[in-house]
Image: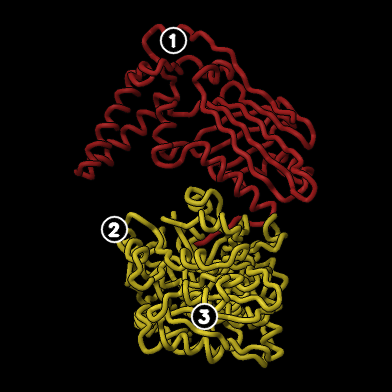
Amino acid sequence: MKALCWFGTNDVRVENVPEPRILNARDAIVRISLTAICGSDLHLYDGFIPTMRRGDILGHEFMGEVVELGAENAKLELGDRVVVPFTISCGRCFFCERDLWSLCDNSNPNAWMAEKVYGASPSGLFGYSHMMGGYPGGQAEYARVPFADVGPIKIPDHLTDEQVLFISDIFPTGYMAAENCAMTPGDTIAVWGCGPVGQFAIKSAWMLGAGRVIAIDREPERLAMAAAHGKAEILNFDQVDVFHALKDMTGGRGPDACIDAVGLEAHGSGTWDAVYDKIKTTTFLATDRLSVLRQAIHACRKGGTVSIPGVYGGFLDKVPLGAAFNKGLTLRMGQTHVQRYLPVLLEKIDRGEIDPSFVITHRIKLEDAPQAYETFKNKQDDCIKVVVKP
Amino acid sequence: MDYMELQFPDDTRDAAVASGRNISDVERWTSLAAGAAMAAYGLSKRRGTGWMLAALGGMLLQRGYSGHCNVYHAMGVNTAGARSDTRRALGGSAGIVVDESVTINRPIEELYHFWRNLENLPRFMRHLESVERVTDTLSRWRAKGPAGTTVEWNAEIINEVRNQVIGWKSIEGSDVVSAGSVNFDDAGVGRGTHVRVRLQYSPPGGKLGAAFAKLFGRDAATEIREDLRRFKQLVETGEIARNH
């Protein structure tokens, strides 16, 4: 089959690879009907995530038809149309039982690698490095889905692929980011990063009772989408000083909660700390660029919450923990517990409360995926979200 | 908590030691095999690391041929003539000690029962080829050893408290001298079971072999930790996570 494979920094190729097969009794094989490139795939493309190997199949947002089942998968049937969560979870461990699906104890065959770096291993993820399980991803014609009696959710026929694909990752990720803000009605929420996760965080903030949503980015098309679809007030960080602007907009108090939907490759805008991060990561003296996180902590009101859906990987330099401590902030973060949100969000889509396909700007074939990574990375052609038909 | 303590008094070595030999027969043969393999591989490389491996291989060959290990000599370790007696083999500094724990989201009774049925162990212990029940307390074990070898030993259950602890030791005529215990403790309501494995063994290839194994990331503690992880996966989910 054809699959998009990682070969190194800025080097992905469509290759012919063997088709996946059933390895365990709870597995399913899915013929992929639609998949997507995620902003977090760019961290792999940019070489920020360790333990990638040449030939690894990327992709963790996918859906399709069940074409093969393991002997003990009693939940699915051949022909079922399913969306697959990007987190792989067994459903039976301490963490799955507590609804903490992305912390599953049993789904990472390379848990020892993550334990060396993080002290304990999160769940396995599709197509996201060997440290996260070394599972082949979904930017391919077929994928093997472990614990398929727990993760995949069946989709009613009347909903289109484009409407439901994003409950695999970015919609629940944005939703959890908003939920983590622990809002009281009328709260002001500031969202850094108007990529797809940021867009869904904005939408979700309204759903959960925000009184005001402020979106921060510098790409005009992304800010425009946040204003048009997200009904957010917008700030272009190339044009204004974000900290002072947020203070001004909130009567000097700061936003009640701040969402960092950017993560470890923040660009900053020529501020001293962004330049410092750039130099240190370029010279391998640091692992993450975190100017957004610093700004979010700095701007957040006393007693507020900083919610972090953006991915971080390593040991962060110059984290203003003093500000977080002295302002009594709550920091909430982590990979999304996708399974927790699947039924809720599917129902919202079914009831017509939201049509997640609004973020799609590019529809391509798998053959064109390498070019699409480049376009997406450089935010050319007003690219916000790429979906791929294998 | 009710652990089986494994303490052996320091022991004087027997007559074989006086002859200048300070490594056991099993260890001699393992050294010869590993030395030859390493030397051949190293020489075929003809590069910096290859030469280094070849030199190490040569040292192992010499060690196996003479039955005397300079490194052991310097460390004050002696494994000669100590093979048949568990207490001698594991006494003092001679043994490798492993102590690893895992919390498993299943009831004690189920885990104890699964483990007590020793034939189950090769399902999650990667290096075990088979465990064969001889009597209720005696069993025959086969495992993959270093450098493609197979090692065998007979074990006897010497301590058994239902739903709490199983303790065992190897008996005479074994390639590997070992003793160990597995404890099962209630982790609290809704929190499953703590499983703790303690193992003490005198490795084939001796401490030097164990040091080499560690160099290549396969030390005993890691292996047992990974075995326990697979045990947990198997009993919690019914399968062992695989990515290929």
For residue A305, side relative to residue B218 (left or right): right
As measured in the structure, the alpha-carbon distance from the residue carrying label 3 to the one carrying label 1 is 80 Å
Residue A289's disc is none
Residue A62's image quarter?
bottom right
Same chain for labels 2 and 1? Say yes or no. no
Give the percent coordinates (x, y) of residue B187: 74, 43
Name the residue carrying label 3.
A215
Q: Residue at x 54, y 90 (%)?
A: A358
As rendered, which of B33 and A379 lies closer to the eye? A379
Q: Amino acid at mark 3?
A: Ala
**Of marks 2 and 1, the one in the foreground:** 2
Q: Residue at the spot x=58%, y=70% of the render?
A: A253
- Closer to the observer: label 3 or label 1? 3
Disc 3 or 2, which lies upstream in sequence? 3
- Name the residue carrying label 1: B16
Q: Which chain is yellow?
A: A
- Residue type beneath disc 1: Ala
Q: Quadrant of residue A364?
A: bottom left
Relative image position of residue A170 (x, y in whole percent): 55, 77
Seen from the viewer's position, the closer of residues B177 and A5 is A5
Give the CA distance from mark 3 to mark 2. 32 Å
On screen, A153 above or below A353?
above
What residue does disc 2 label?
A283
Residue A154 in the image: state x and y as whole percent.
Answer: 68, 80
Residue type at the position of mark 2: Thr
Q: Residue at x 73, y 26 (%)?
A: B159
